Image: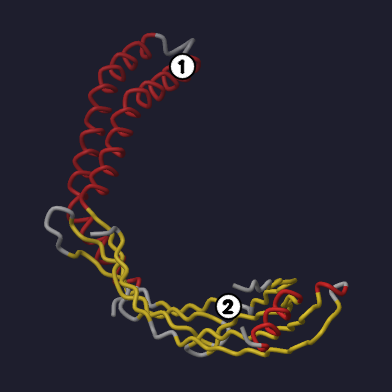
């Protein structure tokens, strides 16, 4: 009998093992790209700043920082978006959720009773079919069914002789 | 042809049967129950549908339904 905490932990462990190195690699790559792009521009800006330090620094700092932030977001939003889409696609293609079990149905007084002790959600690896995590879903459900009355307005029986 | 045949023939040709009433369907432990109270009236067609006889027909029936096991698998194999 596995509870929701164990189910989430097992699924989280598997996702962590599979996807954490890729996330780390993507973050490092994104950081390097930002540094490569920003460093020469910062150097040039500092040189220019020293020359013009007396008069016009404030507007230039504002303009430069605005431009740099815009550029970083413009250049990195695409790769980050692609990375997230790819990660979601990989998650979906890697795992297969399955609901399995037997539901027992019986007629009770003024209702129908549905019960199950073996229904569960299983998360499986699509490639191997190996179960990664399982969550029991005990079912105990009653559907009330009220009595129905049919009123027979009139049935006319005509008998013919042969 | 006998006199009895003639009487029956005359009765059948002359009368008709009208059925009215209520039928109730409900669930009870392990079964579907059906009960009805039917009122039956024989009318004389050749005398302005005058009632000739009335019958009350109470009915009660019970259909036993055993437990059913429904295998669930989503997605289907």
Would you name the residue on which mark 2 appears? A144
Residue A67, how many percent across, how many down?
41, 18
**Relative depth, front residue between A56 and A66:** A66
Q: Chain of mark 1?
A: A
Residue A60, how many percent across, how many down?
45, 14
Measure the C-alpha gap from mark 2 to mark 1.
70 Å
**Relative depth, front residue between B4 and A20:** B4
Identify the secondary structure beneath mark 1.
Answer: helix
Looking at the rendered image, the quarter that the N terminus of chain A falls into is: bottom left
User: In this rendering, is residue A34 above or below B26?
Assistant: above
User: In this rendering, is residue A52 above or below A91?
Assistant: above
- Dots 2, 1 in contact, CB < 8 A: no
Identify the secondary structure beneath mark 2.
Answer: strand
Answer with the quarter of the image where residue A149 lies: bottom right
Residue A105, how many percent across, how many down?
41, 79
Q: Chain of mark 2?
A: A
Q: Residues within 10 Å of mark 2 (few under 14, many from 20)?
A: few
Residue A141, how many percent across, how many down?
48, 77
Left or right: residue A103 versus residue B43 is left
Q: Are marks 2 and 1 on the same chain?
A: yes
The disc, 2 or 1, on the residue closer to the chain's N-terminal end is 1
Left or right: residue A61 versus residue A151 is left
**Relative depth, front residue between A42 and B13:** B13
The mark closer to the camera, 2 or 1, is: 2
Would you name the residue on which mark 1 appears? A63
């Amino acid at each position: 009998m596995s509870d929701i905490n164990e189910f989430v932990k097992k699924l989280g462990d598997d996702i962590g093992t599979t996807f954490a190195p890729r996330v780390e690699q993507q973050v490092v790559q994104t950081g390097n790209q930002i540094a490569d792009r920003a460093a020469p521009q910062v150097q040039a800006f500092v040189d220019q700043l020293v020359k013009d330090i007396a008069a016009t620094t404030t507007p230039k700092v504002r303009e430069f920082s605005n431009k740099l932030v815009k550029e970083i977001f413009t250049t990195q939003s695409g790769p980050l978006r692609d990375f997230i889409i790819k990660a979601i696609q990989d998650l979906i293609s890697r795992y297969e959720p399955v609901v399995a079990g037997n539901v027992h149905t019986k007629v009770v007084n003024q209702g129908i009773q549905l019960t199950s002790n073996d229904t569960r959600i299983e998360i499986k690896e699509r490639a191997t079919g190996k179960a990664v995590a399982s969550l029991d879903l005990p079912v105990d459900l009653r559907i009330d069914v009220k009595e129905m009355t049919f009123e027979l307005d009139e049935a006319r029986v005509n008998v013919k002789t042969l | 042809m006998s006199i009895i045949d003639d009487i029956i023939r005359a009765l059948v040709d002359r009368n008709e049967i009208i059925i009215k009433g209520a039928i109730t369907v409900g669930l009870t432990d392990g079964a579907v129950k059906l009960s009805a109270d039917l009122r039956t009236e024989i009318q004389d067609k050749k005398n302005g549908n005058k009632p000739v006889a009335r019958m009350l027909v109470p009915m009660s029936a019970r259909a036993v339904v055993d437990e059913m096991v429904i295998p669930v698998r989503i997605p289907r194999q």
